[in-house]
Image: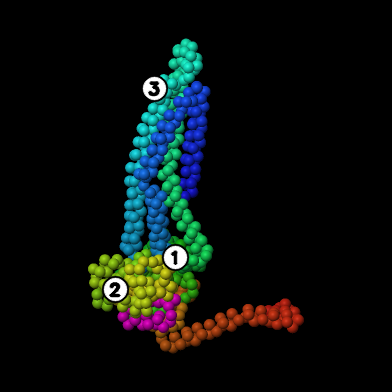
Amino acid sequence: MFSQSVAHLYSHLTKPILDIALISFTLISYASRRGSIKNVVVPSLLAISVVGTTAGLLKSISPKFGHMVAEEAKRKGYLRYLHSRVITNSEEIAFYGGHEAEYNQLNKAYGDLKDQTTLIFRKRILYIMVEQFLMKYVWSGTGMVMIALPILSAEYATPNRSRLLADEPDGGVSERTRGFATAKNLLYSSADAVERLMTSYKEVTELAGYTSRVHEMFKVFEDVKNSIYCRTLVNGSQDGSDRGERFDTSRIEGKVMQSINDAIVFVNVPIVTPNGDVVVKNMSIEIKPGMHILITGPNGCGKSSFFRILGGLWPVYRGTVERPRTHRMYYIPQRPYMTLGTLRDQVRFNLLKVSLKVIYPDTVEQMRRKGGTDSDLLRILKIVHLSYIVDREGGWNATNDWMDVLSGGEKQRIGLARRDFRPLYALLDECTSAVSIDVEGNIYQTIKDSGITLLTVTHRPSLWKFHTHLLQFDGEGSYRLSLLNDSTIGERLSLSDEKRHIEEKLSEVQQMKERLIELCQILGEDADAIALDTEDSNES
């Protein structure tokens, strides 16, 4: 908009200014040739006074178009920002059931933009009405008066010029008529040029508004360059990989049914990404309440995809899925979604006996109607060791961009604080990867003591003890469900320690090679030959 306004304004300013200069010069030259230069002063003063009065009047009644346009651009940007947040965090919003809260925010932002745009149009209509009246009628009448003044004063020509005109066959009528028409057309053109110049005043004020927005943008760029403000960008990873097998996503033949006994049952269900990649070929599994499942596997093997199908975000292309009602499952992602609003708006909970959802995706009014208080919120934050942020951020009504203000661990604990206290299943997708181990253990123990069945995706061995079964994806389209008892946990801990030990040794290999070359240089030996001998011995 800034570039368009500059380009548009350039043509709308330069041409009228050039027209005014050329027409004024032509009128003065025309009057001088006819010997009536002395009659130019009064009409010129009249024209200048009318134009000056018009400009002063329009300036006095002109709204602050620059400020209003800048505010409109700001609200447009905010609306686009809200849409981009919804697009980026669509999965988290769907799992939280936050569509109504996001809709209310978008609707409010759209309403604010609509109100601002309506205000600009309403102010502009009144201004244009006065402007057009002055320029179309007052200026036209002034032009006629300017032409009529020499006639009314009978001094439209010198005596010598009058005698020459009297010698004409028609007494100089045609010559006078031609001069009158020429002067009238030139004055009309001049008035039109001045009108276009005056009209450009609105565009100049609007350009000032756009310029202020561009200045703010460059200021933010400069702040980022100087590390004064740095926004953390989180890139979502794509689940699934190309294993050479494709699925026809246009055919959705699977069934989703409500479970009778609140169990989660998959019968011959493939896990397929939206682009048709087959992550798991055929999955048949039954998870009953009380079976705490630890889900492991390499990246892109289907761990998060399993949750997406369970939450209804991805379709069931084949087979049958039985699951409890949606409100009996609660999903907590690795990257919790922080809604725009106050600190109070970030938390959601359910009391053990009274159903409350405070706040996200509920509103403050909904919380109050359900009997929720700030004391209830504080008690929930104490469970996840976050009660200190209320004082740190300035109270429950503090408003901020919480995606940037809160640390990774704090955001994950906010996500845990939102959980319903009495869902049947908690789907935890690496939701404590940035939380300390001791706090993580307390939170998991609290969830488990509440009678909630855990379905956890994690790489932390410290969480194995909270689970009874292991669901392991191999990354090749297969999976395995097995018991996770004390002996199995001990065996896996031993294997994990061995893996970590090998990784540490491998990380030292490069350092040892560099040290070997350094020693060879000190001793004056051929480092390349030694390195080659080392490679040959490794190959043998």
Give 13 or 108, whichever is nearer the viewer.
13
Q: Quickly name the residue at label 3.
A: 152
Q: Residue at coordinates 66% horizontally, 79% vertically from top-left? A: 514
Q: Amino acid at mark 2?
A: Asp
Q: Is residue 127 above or below residue 102?
A: above
Residue 212 image point, x, y percent:
45, 54
The circle drawn on residue 396 is none
Say which label, 3 or 1, has the lower sequence index.
3
Q: Amino acid at mark 3?
A: Leu
Which amino acid does the dot numbered 1 rest on? Thr
Asked if disc 2 and disc 3 are in contact, CB closer than 8 Å, the reply is no
Magenta segment boundaries in residue numbering:
429-456
Measure how far apart labels 2 and 1 are at the Cα level: 42 Å
Q: Which residue is mark 2?
A: 374
The residue at the point 43 percent across, 35 percent down is 48
- Where does the image place residue 488, in percent across and percent down from the top left? 44, 86
